Image (spheres, grey):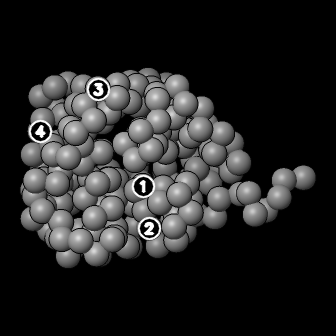
């Protein structure tokens, strides 16, 4: 039997609510920065998606620490260019392949890879080590990881309802919630 202290305790609604509060406190950097980085990621056919995630994670980290979030912070995802780029490509490819296989496999892949990019960005972990660590953490409570990824996915998807424009608000909320969960569960800073 597994020790319940080893099982991550997700506070799913709290992460989303807290992320919304930070985005609301710094709307221009989060929403405009998200817009610019999503366009860059789109024009690169997803190759620079890891940098978009990293930029939002870095902005959320600053907001949570009580530091002022600025528009230029979204570009700090480019600071560790190579590893972040490779991590983003792996993440996007695996997630899209999973989604193409009738959606549910995509949610499972998303649950398994939840901490992959933050481990590369914040712990400078090599790609292979980051994949193994995120997999190991996910296996401690795979259902919770998949459920949390599903919540994040639908938060982001909700923005697509209004001709896609709302995604520029909901994407930083969803990705920011991923960072807050990472900080709480992986780094243990609740």
**Label 2 with label 1: CB-CB less than 8 Å:** yes
Q: In the shown orientation, is residue 169 left or right of residue 105?
A: left
Q: Quadrant of residue 134?
A: top right
| Extreme residue toward the right, this view | 1
Crowding at dot 2, Cα within 10 Å, few <14 / some 14-19 / many 20+, comes out as many
Which residue is found at the position 22% from the left and 39% from the top? 79
Q: Nearer the viewer, residue 33 or 163?
A: 33
Residue highlighted by disc 4: 39
Q: Nearer the viewer, residue 120 or 92?
A: 120
Comparing labels 3 and 2, the label whose residue is closer to the camera: 3
Tell me where residue 179 appears, x and y as whole percent. Answer: 40, 56
Residue highlighted by disc 2: 15
Residue highlighted by disc 3: 82
**Which circle's residue, 4 or 2, is located before the other in the chain?**
2
**Which circle's residue, 3 or 2, is located before the other in the chain?**
2
Residue highlighted by disc 1: 178
Crowding at dot 4, Cα within 10 Å, few <14 / some 14-19 / many 20+, comes out as some
Relative to 173, residue 89 above or below: above
Crowding at dot 3, Cα within 10 Å, few <14 / some 14-19 / many 20+, comes out as few
Tell me where residue 98 appears, x and y as whole percent. Answer: 48, 28
**Label 3 with label 1: CB-CB less than 8 Å:** no
**Which circle's residue, 1 or 4, is located before the other in the chain?**
4
Q: CA distance from mark 2 to mark 1?
A: 8 Å
């Amino acid at each position: 039997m597994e020790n319940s202290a080893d099982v991550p305790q997700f506070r799913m609604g709290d992460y989303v609510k807290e992320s919304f509060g930070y985005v609301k406190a710094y709307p221009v950097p989060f929403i405009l920065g998200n817009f610019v980085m999503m366009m860059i990621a789109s024009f690169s056919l997803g190759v620079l998606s890891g940098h978009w995630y990293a930029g939002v994670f870095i902005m959320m980290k600053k907001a949570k620490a009580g530091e002022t979030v600025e528009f230029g912070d979204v570009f700090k995802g480019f600071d560790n260019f190579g590893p972040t780029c490779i991590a983003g490509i792996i993440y996007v490819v695996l997630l899209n392949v999973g989604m193409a296989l009738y959606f549910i496999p995509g949610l499972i892949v998303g649950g398994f890879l939840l901490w992959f990019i933050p481990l590369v960005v914040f712990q400078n972990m090599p790609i292979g080590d980051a994949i193994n660590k995120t997999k190991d953490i996910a296996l401690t409570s795979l259902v919770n990881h998949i459920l949390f990824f599903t919540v994040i996915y639908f938060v982001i998807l909700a923005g697509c309802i209004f001709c896609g424009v709302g995604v520029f608000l909901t994407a930083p909320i969803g990705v920011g919630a991923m960072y807050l969960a990472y900080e709480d569960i992986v780094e243990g800073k609740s």
